[in-house]
Image (cartoon, rainbow, N blue to C red):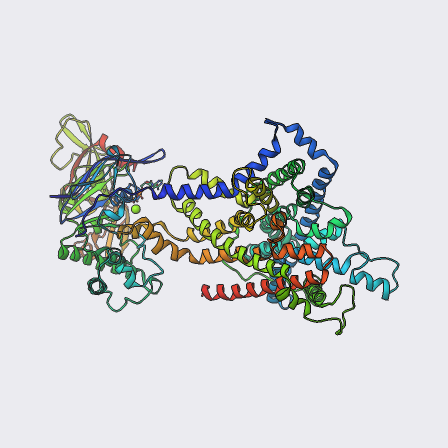
């Protein structure tokens, strides 16, 4: 059953059209991530759902209640939408203690004092902030303020939590820990989470489902993390999910040739009759060897990065990137020098029509 | 689980916008429009020829010229004095710089018309103490200086206005990145070249903007010219407006002349503010960052002691001497007696505080007017700034425009406009009551409140309010719980920025007072005009004490709040 339904939303600021015809639905109880490059309109969408902005057209329903529909003149203010929101900049109130910050939603709901106290302490314990309730935000670290913001969003048991890049300002360790905790909380409480980020790693780790949004605010693919990573349906998603290698391939009669050279492709040919194709790989799917079967290339650049070796390889005018763990490269004799030739094979690849790829390369 | 309830928000935003626009329209826009209307609209038609005729009348024309002469003289003088002292206390090894800097800011607190009174006592051609001393004791044939002159007026205004330039230039010099100068020095430039090529161009915008502020202030300045000019028939625009209205009891002709003069002031003020905005926007401001640096200090060497003496002499002559004279004269039995112990007592002070109804009323009026104006203007300013800075509503542009108005309407213009608006012609007659003064104070000090409050509101990030809304708080609740507590320092600043100056206000109240609604400023001025010099000086002394005590309380208070 869906808890949020976004239907044909359009929103523009002056000349700048951020969203047009955006449709999205989120199931009850899932952790749904909206992933896209920064500036693509994720925050705008979140603000539309929370009620801080009004769409130009379209409809948003939460829990089967239409909360905004400009055509019908409906716009329920944010305070009556029953959501928990965590802002990118925490938005912890600097003049209130941790206790007062977290207790505010309950105070507004006029809950009795004792219940308020118990619930606040319980929530603070949940985010690992027990004992700090009398501090002011200025006496907290960034990560602790983050937890206060999270506790404040959770304290009233909202059925729906909106999180806008809440982990961006944390250091790597804390980010990983908090990411885990958010996921744990969501499971424990059974809340629905809409999480917005530009960080694919977090998105893959945390989501039950995720949607990839492109620069123009269009949703390119919605699926579970595994499918998004392994079966991207379009080159934008592919590109966005990892540094991709794109090798142009041209059709010559019945055969397909790599780049500008005469080497035949060693893989299944693409389905379709377009004359130009592009094969896409992840660096981790590219295997190099000193000799054997595969296509021949030249090592253009070899970079030693400690645990990893990075190679840039040219194949008849096309460039590929690959990386191998250094100890593996040493053990298997794969330490290439610049200018050496090598043989490349591929574990996995995806075919794209060259025309559809043009826009990805442009980005 | 929090249920989603459907309740339509009643247009709080529109309501606030409506109130904000109404306040500014009623308090500022209507008076100004009435002035323009009365100036240009004669017998039901637009008549610019008549305006030109009024401007060319000898006394009006002379007042315009006088305003210009005095404003230019004051601006040039203050700029030189202010820049020089600013450079001394920031960029040299002058001793006691901190103390000097504090002292150079004292004139900000002192009402210039009280200063003018003091200088009148010191340097009036026949009765001034200094002139008398030179004639009687040193055998001079005549007075050494006549304060009732253009030069006298300009000098007194410079003494009280130069801090505007001083504070701006000090700020710019302190914030200027010294590496700019250092790199010039490394590349071999001498100190003179560095000053000319690097320092001056960098602080020029600050100097100019301070100078323009003084120009604006002096053009529209009433007190000094009123005290020192009348004797020799020197009128500027504000004093002529006052003279016309006061003498004629509000006849049509005098009101028209007044509105034409006021129009000139409004246009000049708008022009100056526009220019100032341009200079501050252009300028080399990006190089002057927000950080404080430890600037390179020039060694004064042999000049160190003479320059210290100069500063002390300046402070003694312009601050200590006039203040002392006010208190001493306030202690005399009769004006003209020598300052001996037999002639001095506290009787005048007792008299004005406890017995004399005129002065007791005046003090009461000023305190209550100041408090009410400060409270009302503070709250109105918070609301208006909130709508301007924080809210997204249609029609905000109008409010933004109206919000600029208070900054460019001088006191005498407000007073005249308020007379036009509230004298019964439009149904409400407040003339001769305290209410008309209150309305005028609100208009006059709205700019301070808008400035302090919008600065505070800029600091309150939107997401803080949105967080409250998403916690279930209504717009009113989020205002009460989040916005108000966070802008409280700005509101307090606004309160004091209004309350203290209103205690010594003269320009507006002098145009609007009735026998029972004198303010402290009006009482000092009129008592002095009536020849009650010692009583007037005693009241001025009391006013100085109130102001200084108030100011130091605020300084202590704000310093505590800041830490
Ligand atoms: N209040 C606003 N006024 C004008 N433009 C806006 C506003 N809010 C967002 N935008 C524009 O909308 C686009 C999407 O912004 P946003 O949703 O914040 O991106 P992100 O995906 O990084 O969160 C950006 O180009 C931004 O400039
Ligand atoms: Mg964002």
How far across and down, in percent of the image, does residue B148 sit? Answer: 76, 52
Q: Quadrant of ligand 1?
A: top left
Left or right position of A362 against B413:
left
**Quadrant in which the N terminus of chain A appears:** top left
The tally of labels here is: 0
Q: Residue at x 53, y 45 (%)?
A: B406
B131 or B200, nearer to the observer: B131
**Quadrant in which the C terminus of chain A appears:** top left
How far across and down, in percent of the image, does residue B347 sit? Answer: 68, 69
Query: For residue A4, which quarter of the picture?
Result: top left
Toward the bottom, the furthest residue is: B341
Left or right position of B143 against B187:
right
Residue B190 visible, this orientation: no
Residue B537 visible, this orientation: yes
Q: Is residue A358 above or below residue B336?
A: above
How far across and down, in percent of the image, does residue A64 sit? Answer: 15, 41
Q: Is residue B437 above or below residue B321?
A: above
B22 or B157, nearer to the observer: B22
B389 or A272, nearer to the observer: B389
Query: For residue A60, which quarter of the picture?
Result: top left
How far across and down, in percent of the image, does residue A260 sit? Answer: 24, 32
Left or right position of A115 against B223:
left
Q: Is residue B298 above or below residue A160?
A: below
Q: Residue at x 13, y 27 (%)?
A: A254
B272 or B436, nearer to the observer: B436
Query: For residue B21, which quarter of the picture?
Result: top left
């Amino acid at each position: 059953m869906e808890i949020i339904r976004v239907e044909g939303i359009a929103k523009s600021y002056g000349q700048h059209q951020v969203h047009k015809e955006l449709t999205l639905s989120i199931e009850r109880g899932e952790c749904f991530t909206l992933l896209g490059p920064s500036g693509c309109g994720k925050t705008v969408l979140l603000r539309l759902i929370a009620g801080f902005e009004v769409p130009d057209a379209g409809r948003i329903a939460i829990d089967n209640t239409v909360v905004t529909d400009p055509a019908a003149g409906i716009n329920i203010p944010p305070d009556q939408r029953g959501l928990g929101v965590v802002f990118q900049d925490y938005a912890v109130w600097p003049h209130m203690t941790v206790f007062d910050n977290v207790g505010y939603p309950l105070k507004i709901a006029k809950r009795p004092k004792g219940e308020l106290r118990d619930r606040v302490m319980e929530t603070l314990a949940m985010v690992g902030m027990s004992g700090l309730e009398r501090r002011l935000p200025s006496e907290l670290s960034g990560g602790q303020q983050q937890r206060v913001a999270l506790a404040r969003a959770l304290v009233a048991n909202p059925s729906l939590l909106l999180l806008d890049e809440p982990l961006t300002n944390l250091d790597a360790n804390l980010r990983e820990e908090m990411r885990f905790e958010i996921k744990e909380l969501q499971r424990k409480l059974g809340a629905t989470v809409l999480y917005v980020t530009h960080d694919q790693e977090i998105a893959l780790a945390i989501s039950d489902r995720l949607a990839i949004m492109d620069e123009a605010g269009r949703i390119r693919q919605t699926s579970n993390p595994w499918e998004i990573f392994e079966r991207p349906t379009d080159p934008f998603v592919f590109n966005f999910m990892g540094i991709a290698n794109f090798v142009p391939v041209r059709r010559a009669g019945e055969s397909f040739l790599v780049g500008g050279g005469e080497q035949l492709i060693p893989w299944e040919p693409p389905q379709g009759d377009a004359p130009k194709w592009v094969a896409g790989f992840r660096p981790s799917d590219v295997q190099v060897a000193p000799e054997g079967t595969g296509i021949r290339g030249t090592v253009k650049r070899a970079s030693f990065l400690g645990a990893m070796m990075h190679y840039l390889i040219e194949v008849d005018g096309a460039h590929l990137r690959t990386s191998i763990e250094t100890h593996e490269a040493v053990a298997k004799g794969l330490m290439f020098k610049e200018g050496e030739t090598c043989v490349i094979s591929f574990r996995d690849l995806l075919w794209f029509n060259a025309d559809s790829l043009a826009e990805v390369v442009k980005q | 689980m929090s249920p989603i309830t459907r309740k339509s928000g009643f247009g709080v935003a529109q309501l606030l916008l409506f109130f904000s626009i109404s306040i500014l329209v009623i308090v500022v826009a209507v008076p100004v429009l009435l002035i323009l209307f009365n100036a240009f609209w004669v017998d039901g038609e637009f008549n610019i020829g008549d305006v030109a005729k009024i401007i060319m009348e000898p006394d009006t024309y002379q007042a315009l010229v006088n305003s210009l002469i005095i404003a230019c003289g004051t601006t040039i003088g203050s700029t030189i004095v202010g820049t020089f002292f600013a450079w001394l206390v920031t960029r040299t090894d002058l001793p006691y710089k901190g103390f000097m800097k504090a002292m150079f800011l004292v004139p900000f607190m002192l009402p210039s018309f009280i200063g003018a009174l003091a200088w009148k006592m010191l340097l009036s051609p026949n009765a001034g103490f200094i002139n008398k001393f030179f004639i009687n004791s040193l055998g001079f044939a005549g007075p050494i200086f006549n304060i009732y002159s253009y030069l006298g007026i300009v000098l007194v205004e410079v003494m009280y206005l130069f801090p505007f330039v001083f504070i701006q230039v000090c700020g710019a010099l302190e914030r200027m990145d010294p590496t700019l100068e250092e790199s010039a020095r490394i590349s071999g430039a001498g100190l003179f070249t560095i000053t000319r090529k690097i320092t001056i161009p960098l602080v020029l915008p600050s100097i100019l903007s301070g100078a323009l502020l003084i120009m604006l202030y002096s053009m529209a300045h009433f007190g000094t010219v009123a005290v020192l000019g009348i004797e020799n028939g020197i009128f500027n625009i504000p004093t002529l407006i006052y003279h016309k209205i006061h003498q004629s009891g509000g006849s049509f002709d005098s009101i028209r002349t007044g509105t034409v003069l006021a129009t000139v002031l409004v246009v000049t003020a708008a022009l100056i503010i526009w220019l100032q905005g341009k200079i501050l926007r252009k300028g080399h401001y990006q190089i002057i960052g927000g950080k404080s640096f430890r600037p390179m200090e020039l060694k004064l060497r042999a000049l160190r002691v003479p320059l210290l003496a100069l500063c002390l002499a300046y402070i003694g002559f312009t601050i200590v001497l006039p203040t002392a004279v006010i208190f001493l004269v306030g202690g005399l039995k009769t004006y003209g007696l020598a300052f001996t112990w037999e002639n001095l007592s506290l009787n005048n002070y007792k008299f004005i505080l406890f017995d004399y109804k005129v002065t007791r009323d005046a003090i009461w009026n000023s305190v209550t007017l100041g408090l009410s104006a400060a409270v009302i203007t503070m709250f109105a300013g918070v609301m208006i700034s909130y709508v301007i800075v924080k809210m997204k509503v249609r029609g905000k542009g109008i409010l933004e425009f109206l919000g600029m108005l208070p900054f460019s309407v001088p006191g005498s213009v407000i007073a005249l406009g308020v007379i036009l608006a509230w004298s019964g012609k439009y149904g409400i007659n407040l003339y001769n009551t305290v209410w008309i003064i209150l309305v005028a104070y609100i208009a006059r000090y709205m700019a301070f409140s808008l400035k302090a409050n919008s600065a505070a509101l800029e600091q309150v990030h939107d997401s803080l309010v949105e967080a409250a809304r998403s916690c279930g708080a209504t717009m009113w609740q989020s205002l009460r719980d989040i916005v108000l507590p966070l802008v409280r320092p700005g509101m307090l600043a606004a309160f004091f920025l209004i309350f203290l100056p209103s205690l010594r206000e003269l320009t507006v109240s002098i145009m609007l007072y009735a026998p029972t609604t004198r303010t402290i400023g009006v009482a000092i001025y009129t008592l002095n005009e009536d020849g009650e010099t010692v009583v007037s000086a005693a009241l001025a002394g009391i006013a100085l004490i109130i102001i200084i005590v108030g100011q130091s309380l605020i300084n202590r208070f704000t310093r505590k709040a800041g830490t």
